[in-house]
Image: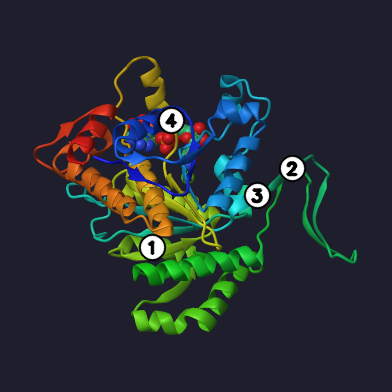
């Protein structure tokens, strides 16, 4: 059988630990036998980030801007423990944070629903997509500690040198301060990509923030969404029979739990980070969640929503068997290959992506699954397989 040919390379961002092991296995077992895979490879593994002073992360984001589509493996965000473990020169920033700051845009996360894995929330019969704003807020924060007796102020200086000052706190005892920002243009891009995604998928859009407490910051998000909706999308939404509504984040949380699903929940950066883990876990497993960053200028970066699965990796290093679920990482590849196929007009590539996704779902629905799903599956005849065994079961269906 002739391999499927590609035109433009995918930007391939390799990563760390167990997901790095899976990354290679997916390529060897599921992709390379069928596709003449064209990628521009960037090693975002922590060792290479450390050697290049994190330049490799910046280069990979710029390559994504150039080619338009990337696929990313999960990567370690260093903390104090990782400093020693990897003998790091610096506590490098989160690669996802760096990439999102360069590409801007919105991260859409959607659970992969399979028979036999009922959501913990009984009434969730349809998927809930989380749209996470991917720029700014605490991910681009400046933080300081303040000793007792210090005064912290917020200062904004205009181009002609005029200062506006606001007192944050007079510290009687020691404390901490954080400065965060966002940009109108980025919020506008966030709003438009959410409205477009809602029209594309035919799902209603909810947006939530804490504008009652954050009367300038969060309120700006609310106003920008409302203005763009009124001026550009209201009629299209009415024609499509879908709705947009804004509500406070605490009200949204309560409504989401009572809902049957089937809508997009747009969240600010931090809310989306936290809520997507809650939503994916409630649908069954962190490993059954797709994630794509869409920039306002139509650039796509596909990844898994989970981390590097450190605990499994340490078992793997000890030679113990692992049962790591590769579905989200496979769907990152299929998402990227399908998008490349659409942009380069290679229907075989899109068809291959569809078939590989179908093979993953069929494998699980036939009762063959990794431990995370085995523990919660309601299927009567089910078998737990190891990491490679799962990939081979998918390959045999593919
Ligand atoms: P994690 O990799 O998401 O894993 C947490 C736990 O969730 C695992 O121990 C495992 O539970 C379960 N799990 C997650 N993915 C799984 C999969 N594919 N198959 C089966 N089980 C899965 O989080 P972590 O171990 O706390 O973080 C490890 C590293 O990932 C950290 O250094 C963090 O910085 C990084 N991280 C990266 C990204 C990213 O690049 N997108 C996102 C989040 C975290 P059991 O152990 O109970 O089986
Ligand atoms: Mg998270």
In this rendering, which labeled residue sits more in front, label 3 or label 1? Answer: 3
- Is label 2 in a helix, a strand or a loop? strand
Residue of label 1:
254
* Earlier sequence position, callout 2 versus callout 4: 4
Residue of label 2:
144
Q: Nearer the viewer, residue 80 or 88?
A: 88
In this rendering, which labeled residue sits more in front, label 4 or label 1? Answer: 4
In this rendering, which labeled residue sits more in front, label 2 or label 4? Answer: 4
Which color scheme is applied? rainbow
Q: Is residue 290 above or below residue 87?
A: below
**Residues at marks 4 and 3, CA–CA distance in whole angstroms:** 27 Å
Q: Nearer the viewer, residue 376 or 197?
A: 197
Report x, y in % for residue 22.
37, 31
The quarter of the image that holds ligand 1 is: top left
Residue of label 3:
140
The C terminus: image quadrant: top left
Q: Is residue 232 left or right of residue 320?
A: right
- Is label 3 in a helix, a strand or a loop? helix
Residue of label 4:
20
| Figure quadrant of residue 84 | top right
Report x, y in % for residue 165.
83, 62
* Earlier sequence position, callout 1 versus callout 2: 2
| Figure quadrant of residue 134 | bottom right
Q: Residues within 10 Å of mark 4 (few under 14, many from 20)?
A: some
Residue at the far left in the pictured view: 380
| Residue at 27 percent of width and 45 percent of height | 356
Report x, y in % for residue 7.
44, 49
**Residues at marks 3 and 2, CA–CA distance in whole angstroms:** 14 Å
Q: Residues within 10 Å of mark 2 (few under 14, many from 20)?
A: few
The N terminus: image quadrant: top left
């Amino acid at each position: 059988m002739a391999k499927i040919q590609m035109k433009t390379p995918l930007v391939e961002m390799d990563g760390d630990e167990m997901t790095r092991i899976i990354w290679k296995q997916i390529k060897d077992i599921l992709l390379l036998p069928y596709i003449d895979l064209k990628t521009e490879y960037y090693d975002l593994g922590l060792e290479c980030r450390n050697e290049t002073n994190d330049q490799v992360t910046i280069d990979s984001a710029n390559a994504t801007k150039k080619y338009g589509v990337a696929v990313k493996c999960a990567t370690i965000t260093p903390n104090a423990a990782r400093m020693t473990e990897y003998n790091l020169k610096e506590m490098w920033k989160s690669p996802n944070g760096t990439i999102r700051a360069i590409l801007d845009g919105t991260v859409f996360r959607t659970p992969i629903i399979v028979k036999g894995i009922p959501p913990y929330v009984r009434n969730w019969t349809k998927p809930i997509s989380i749209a996470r704003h991917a720029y700014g807020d605490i991910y681009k924060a400046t933080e300081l500690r303040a000793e007792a007796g210090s005064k912290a102020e917020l200062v904004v200086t205009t181009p002609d040198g005029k200062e506006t000052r606001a007192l944050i706190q007079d510290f009687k005892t020691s404390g901490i301060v954080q400065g965060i920002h966002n940009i109108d243009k980025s919020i506008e891009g966030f709003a438009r990509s959410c409205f477009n995604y809602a029209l594309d998928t035919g799902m209603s859009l909810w947006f939530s923030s804490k504008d009652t407490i954050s009367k300038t910051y969060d309120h700006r998000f609310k106003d920008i969404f409302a203005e763009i909706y009124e001026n550009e999308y209201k009629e299209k939404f009415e024609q499509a029979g879908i709705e947009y509504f804004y509500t406070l984040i605490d009200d949204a949380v309560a409504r989401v739990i009572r809902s049957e699903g089937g809508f997009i929940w747009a969240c600010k950066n931090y809310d989306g980070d936290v809520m997507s883990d809650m939503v994916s876990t409630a649908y069954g497993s962190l490993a059954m969640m797709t994630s794509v960053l869409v920039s306002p200028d139509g650039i796509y970066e596909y990844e898994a929503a989970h981390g590097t699965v450190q605990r499994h990796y340490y078992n793997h290093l000890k030679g113990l068997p692992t049962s790591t679920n590769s579905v989200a990482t496979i769907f990152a590849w299929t998402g990227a290959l399908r998008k490349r196929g659409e942009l380069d007009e290679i229907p075989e590539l899109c068809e291959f992506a569809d078939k590989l996704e179908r093979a993953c779902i069929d494998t699980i629905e036939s009762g063959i699954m990794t431990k995370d799903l085995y523990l919660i599956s309601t299927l009567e005849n089910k078998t737990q397989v190891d990491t490679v065994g799962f990939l081979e079961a998918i390959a045999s269906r593919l």
